[in-house]
Image (cartoon, coloured by chain):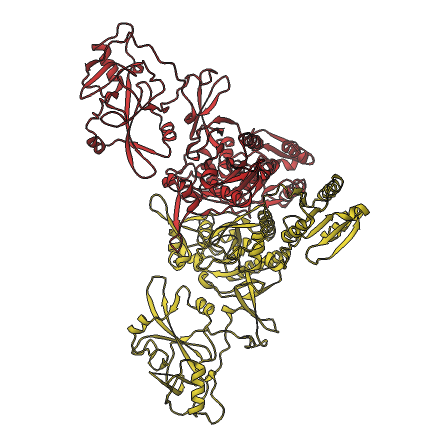
Chain colours: A red, B yellow
Amino acid sequence: MITRLSQLFVRTLRDDPADAEVASHRWLVRAGYIRRAAPGVYSWLPLGIRVLHKVEQIVREEMDAMGAQEVRFPALLPRDPYEATGRWTEYGETLFRLQDRKGVDMLLGPTHEEMFTLMVKDLYSSYKDLPLSLYQIQTKYRDEARPRAGILRGREFIMKDSYSFDVDDAGLEASYQQHREAYIRIFDRLGFDYVIVKAHSGAMGGSASEEFLAVLPAGEDTFVRSPGGYAANVEAVETLTTEPVDYAGVPETEVLETPDTPTIATLVDLINDRFPRGDRPWTAADTLKNVVLKVTDPDGKTRPLVIGVPGDREVDPKRLEAALQPGVATPFEEDDFAKYPSLVKGYIGPQILGRDSESEIEYLVDPRVVVGTAWVTGANEQDRHVAHLVCGRDFTPDGIIDVAEVREGDPAPDGSGPLSLARGVEIGHIFQLGRKYAEALDLKVLDQNGKLVTVTMGSYGLGVSRAVAAIAEATCDDKGLAWPLAVAPFHVQVLATGKGEELFGAAENLAGQLSDLGLDILYDDRKASPGVKFADSELLGMPIVVVVGRGLADGVVEVRDRRSGERRDVPVADAVAAVKELAGI
Amino acid sequence: MITRLSQLFVRTLRDDPADAEVASHRWLVRAGYIRRAAPGVYSWLPLGIRVLHKVEQIVREEMDAMGAQEVRFPALLPRDPYEATGRWTEYGETLFRLQDRKGVDMLLGPTHEEMFTLMVKDLYSSYKDLPLSLYQIQTKYRDEARPRAGILRGREFIMKDSYSFDVDDAGLEASYQQHREAYIRIFDRLGFDYVIVKAHSGAMGGSASEEFLAVLPAGEDTFVRSPGGYAANVEAVETLTTEPVDYAGVPETEVLETPDTPTIATLVDLINDRFPRGDRPWTAADTLKNVVLKVTDPDGKTRPLVIGVPGDREVDPKRLEAALQPGVATPFEEDDFAKYPSLVKGYIGPQILGRDSESEIEYLVDPRVVVGTAWVTGANEQDRHVAHLVCGRDFTPDGIIDVAEVREGDPAPDGSGPLSLARGVEIGHIFQLGRKYAEALDLKVLDQNGKLVTVTMGSYGLGVSRAVAAIAEATCDDKGLAWPLAVAPFHVQVLATGKGEELFGAAENLAGQLSDLGLDILYDDRKASPGVKFADSELLGMPIVVVVGRGLADGVVEVRDRRSGERRDVPVADAVAAVKELAGI
């Protein structure tokens, strides 16, 4: 198939879009693949839709190959099923809600667990019908607070979501593994450099879950890896907990006068100066920092929460968000402090905290704050801290919350060595949901003994439109896009750079020969300068470029590999063979 | 490709869905192709999605073949462009509106003229870029007041919409004809019995427009045809107007006492009895019926409107709706009459009507009410009518409104003979939009003389999901669905009816041979009775059915044509050839 660039609905832009934060966004807009219609909402132009279709097709082929069956649910959904599982509320502002002309509440589906569960309940009733895997490739909606990076994180996007249904845990495990393998095949075919990491299940509920992250500095997700093979999304990293410490030798608590210590660093300096330890200097790790937050639960109610972390670590906002879901944490404001006079800002200590304390304020601590550890922390009085405050002796937390930042070099939880951090884009996420949705919506089947059992489910997401952006992000360079063959809108771009019927005739002839091989050809037939044509071909990013230009007088054309930049002149008669070689056909 | 029925996600139902009004809806649900998710909102099961994909593919191939380029716009759209063209308001309650988390107004796209116009404006600027045709296959939303008949008229549905852009009227005409021809190829391939009729442009604006109607009694659209080739949607039929009549011989108006004449029939009886004509009896066609309506304009304001039609015809609600768009007519209620005391219910006459009259009530008449015609009509007094009321002498309408019912036998407007009426389903609609949208959104290009000219556009819709229902409607019978080969989810259904490994082995072997020909095979491998398998195969509707059953002992299998019902026994060795013959390959 030959498409003439002069006829193609595309305009390349010289300037970056104003809102472009990442390279893929910049190039996809400048090369005329996508256009913004509203914040986080994009239109696909002909070049873009061709890539999207190719990605969709690879996903469809592999889902079919694993025995999943394609269906399609509406995007416009009734409220009831989401009410039954609590997600109508839990999704918070991320859910697009609307009312129809009769005032009936509806929503735009952010994900379809409820609908698939109800459909299987509608059709199936026996263990003999299972296992079952269903999928759809469909448009989804999430009213992201911060849509960003073009189609990398949009509010309307295309996802492949699938769901498995099994009668028991072993079945779920097998279905999960089948999906995992299908995802590996898909992401291999799409040419991604990716990692599979342990993930936090978040609002989906359920137990085991893994993310497929394309390793990309532009990614929003931070993940960790160890030399021994541990890999996890930073939200899912579990800090190693240690045994209680013997505190027999720890002195009684001592109140210290600590004026003008607004930060941990100033506090450490002051106590090293005025209250030095005998054995070694105080460090930030000896202090216990108490962070006060206001948590808003899905029902709209708010409650205070204090989190104690070693003073040398910050609370990681994304780990916090994941740990509190569906609650949402916001900073404790002056107004809030006014309501809780026992909280002395800057000097909060755990002595007065805990659900059973007079304040009734919940107090959770970092896993490093084990029984027996001694801390310097606030004295709940202006300008005063206490030293030697021992966990389990002088204060009792309500529980553990693992939300302190993970740092380069922290030990992997499985003992497989020090962690290193990197960034990635989530391109897939697989969950063992378990029975949460089946229970909420009463999906049961008869088992082999004629007994009703609740079905166990898996849920598997794959960002189709996001994958387009992630491939662009992974493969582009400083000149533009550089698609892999598997998803390029066209395999070959033929440029006629020069003048005269003969030259254009030769270019068109060559384009025809290549098209006859089953390759998709973009033929730049425009009356434009060679400079414009070269620049556009690098911007548009077809993997193979054939230049029919000055060399034609000597019987040669140039064949270029867009990604490597490698170029060579070949005799016209050998051009097809050279392209075939690059195309691997 | 072989799919085993035992593995396919489907359950056939014995009972009709409660809300099924038409056969296609009943069978598509009972055969497990679709399921209702909410009123007018459907999910597609594996069998359904296969048909949908095949229809989509045929549409895509023909759109590509005519040189249209595929794009995809979002369904979630900003308000502004629709505000600029007035459609944010004009669409009324049919538009799904919502607000995002920031309170920004958005809508779910019912059709995308605005977005395409803005995109072309964004990318193109010269006559050299035109003509251009763009299309998308995409999910659309309309909050229909009366969603009905399953996917025949849903609130979420899949449409192919395309738009042409030309620099002048001749270009638009050519683009329109290209689309018309592409539609003919598409509907021919889909196997429709269809007519192309003149259409009313409705809310789209623009001038010339035609509808493609699948001829189906279940259709919502009524159309007319004449022996001479005239064809129009009933909303678009223009009544022949006649020349003014000489009224020199008409007597002066005469007030008649007409008590107890609540209907035209009772009125005609009474006047024939008490005030007989000399030449012939009075008929309903001599009376002028004045229908009072309340019209609500898009801005929410209401106004009274009286429509005068000959007493032998009713106002056709669909013709009225089309004529008044974007206004909406509702009946005149008691409250309304109270506000206009000059309107005496049941005795309204045009003597007191018209914008320039004292009442200032707008008065429009049927085209048959020409100057010089004389009427019996209300005297604007209880129990009284007037006779010999002459149009142009005794009353003056504000204008013409062509909304009276069209009747079998009415003359075609082009003189091509008497009209006959039939019903159809609108499967395509093509419009010459002209410059309405380009003007509203300022889409101009430089012409050959370097002068800015406004682009002229066409808009072309094709109901993809509706086509699936319409094909089902056109082809089903009293046993179930009966798909044409071009869109059947599977070409062949192989039934193993009987017991024993040998029989199932033979069926599977045959399925394999047919699959090797490139046919899609549904293999009923279930352990079910022959009766269940036969009934299901008729319900599911694959065009070719091969039964491997009792005859196998004698070396024969049965090959059935689902639509004709024709069956024949063929030797096992000839089965593949028999199927090939039926499949036309």
Number of callouts: 0
Q: Nearer the viewer, residue B524 or A336?
A: B524
Give the side of residue A364 with respect to residue B528, left or right.
left
Mark yes or no: residue B373 visible: no
Give the side of residue B16 with respect to residue A396, left or right.
right
Q: Hey, which quadrant is residue B177 in on the image?
A: bottom right
In this picture, is A207 found above or below A127? above
Q: Nearer the viewer, residue A14 or B274?
A: B274
The residue sitting at 20% across, 10% down in the picture is A274
Q: Residue furthest top?
A: A278
What percent of the width, then of the height, locates residue B571? 81, 48
Mark yes or no: residue A509 visible: yes
What percent of the width, then of the height, locates residue A457? 51, 35
Q: Nearer the viewer, residue B454 or B175?
A: B175
What percent of the width, then of the height, locates residue A159? 50, 40
Q: Which image quarter is the N terminus of chain B in?
A: top right
In this picture, is A374 found above or below B374? above
What percent of the width, then of the height, locates residue A426? 47, 32
